[in-house]
Image (cartoon, helix red, strand yellow):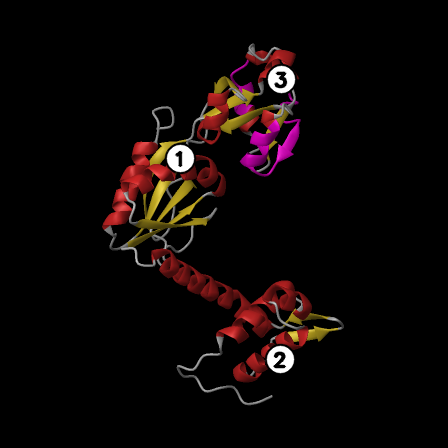
């Protein structure tokens, strides 16, 4: 293998880096070739050229497959972040086009799909010259490094490197489809103990808060069907698979249309909120305008 290239401004070509990224992701030159629209031989040659430029083996050939070396794992971990930032930078530039401003927003997936996105037409009508770049994120991240102007965070006021301001508290309610309410006479909340229940895997204690409001003690309150996303629970509740505890902001449409009916409100035992997160440092005026607009979208029942 050739000596490692001298440390300088010289970089491997983007084609080499993309081939390595795809091969490392799939642990397969064949699958990488399918993703990139290349031949398996072309991917292998690109990876070999990158190894020669770096001066280290990146893959261990294992029969018909490949595995990453320590050097390969380290490069893949860092390169994934670097290429992600590059893609985001290019995406922002493309979105901007000849427009004056771009606003990059990160949002929780279900919150974005069910609360934010339906309201964005109103923002666009107020700011027609603004292009939005919306990212799906579930955990805090470095907003400066990722060039994100504003994010929405759920939980407690804890996001290193960001300034947080409360958007709204979470309001939970037990809801069910009208047919299920009739079948189990759920207009009487105590009957919830005998109806099928839907649970969120990451928050298995929600139904305990409901039981505490009742005089009946039932150790089986946690039995029922479990789902790992609120979006799945909503679909299951609408078709009558069980009663569910859901944030009311996620089911505004279903409550308005009558496909779900609120039975009782659920006590807030953890006091978690939705926050607007803005990176520390200088803030552009558009970010402040969008944050103010977000606060105006919060209805009294959510605030």
Q: Which x, y percent locates residue 208?
A: 56, 24
Q: Which mark is residue 273?
A: 1
Label 1 neighbour load within 10 Å: few <14, some 14-19, many 20+: some
Question: Which secondary structure lies at badge 2?
Answer: helix
Direction from residue 166 to residue 76 in the image, left or right: right
Tell me which segment is drawn in magenta. 208-236
User: Does the magenta portion include 214?
Assistant: yes
- Going from N to C along the chain, the mark reached first, 2 or 1, is 2
Give the residue pinned by disc 3: 180
Give the residue pinned by disc 2: 45
Q: Residue at x 31, y 35 (%)?
A: 295
Label 3 neighbour load within 10 Å: few <14, some 14-19, many 20+: many
Direction from residue 172 to residue 194 in the image, left or right: right
**70 and 182: which is toward the camera:** 182
Question: Which secondary structure lies at badge 1?
Answer: strand
- Going from N to C along the chain, the mark reached first, 3 or 2, is 2
**109 and 55: which is toward the camera:** 109
- Going from N to C along the chain, the mark reached first, 3 or 1, is 3
Q: Which x, y percent locates residue 201?
A: 59, 36
Q: Farthest residue in the right direction? A: 63
Label 2 neighbour load within 10 Å: few <14, some 14-19, many 20+: some
Question: Residue 155: in sight, yes or no?
Answer: no
């Amino acid at each position: 293998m050739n000596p490692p290239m001298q440390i300088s401004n010289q970089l491997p070509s983007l084609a080499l880096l993309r081939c390595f990224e795809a091969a490392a992701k799939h642990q397969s030159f064949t699958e990488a070739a399918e993703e990139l629209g290349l031949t398996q031989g072309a991917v292998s040659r690109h990876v070999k050229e990158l190894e020669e430029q770096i001066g280290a083996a990146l893959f261990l050939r294992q029969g018909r497959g490949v595995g990453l070396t320590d050097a390969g794992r380290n490069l893949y971990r860092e390169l994934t972040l670097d290429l992600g930032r590059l893609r985001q930078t290019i995406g922002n530039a493309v979105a901007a086009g000849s427009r004056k401003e771009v606003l990059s927003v990160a949002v929780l997936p279900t919150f974005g799909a069910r609360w934010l996105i339906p309201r964005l037409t109103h923002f666009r009508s107020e700011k027609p010259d603004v292009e939005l770049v919306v990212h799906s994120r579930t955990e805090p991240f470095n907003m400066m490094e990722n060039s994100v102007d504003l994010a929405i965070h759920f939980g407690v006021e804890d996001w290193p490197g960001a300034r947080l301001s409360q958007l709204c508290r979470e309001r939970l309610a037990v809801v069910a489809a009208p047919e299920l309410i009739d079948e189990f006479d759920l207009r009487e909340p105590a009957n919830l103990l005998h109806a099928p229940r839907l649970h969120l895997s990451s928050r298995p204690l929600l139904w305990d808060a409901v039981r505490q409001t009742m005089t009946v003690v039932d150790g089986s309150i946690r039995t029922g069907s479990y789902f790992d996303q609120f979006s799945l629970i909503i679909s299951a509740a609408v078709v009558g698979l069980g009663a569910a505890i859901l944030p009311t902001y996620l089911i505004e449409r279903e409550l308005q249309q009558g496909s779900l009916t609120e039975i009782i409100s659920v006590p807030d035992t953890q006091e978690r909120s939705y926050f607007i997160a803005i990176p520390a440092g200088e803030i552009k005026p558009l970010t402040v305008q969008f944050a103010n607009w977000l606060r105006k979208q919060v209805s009294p029942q959510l605030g």
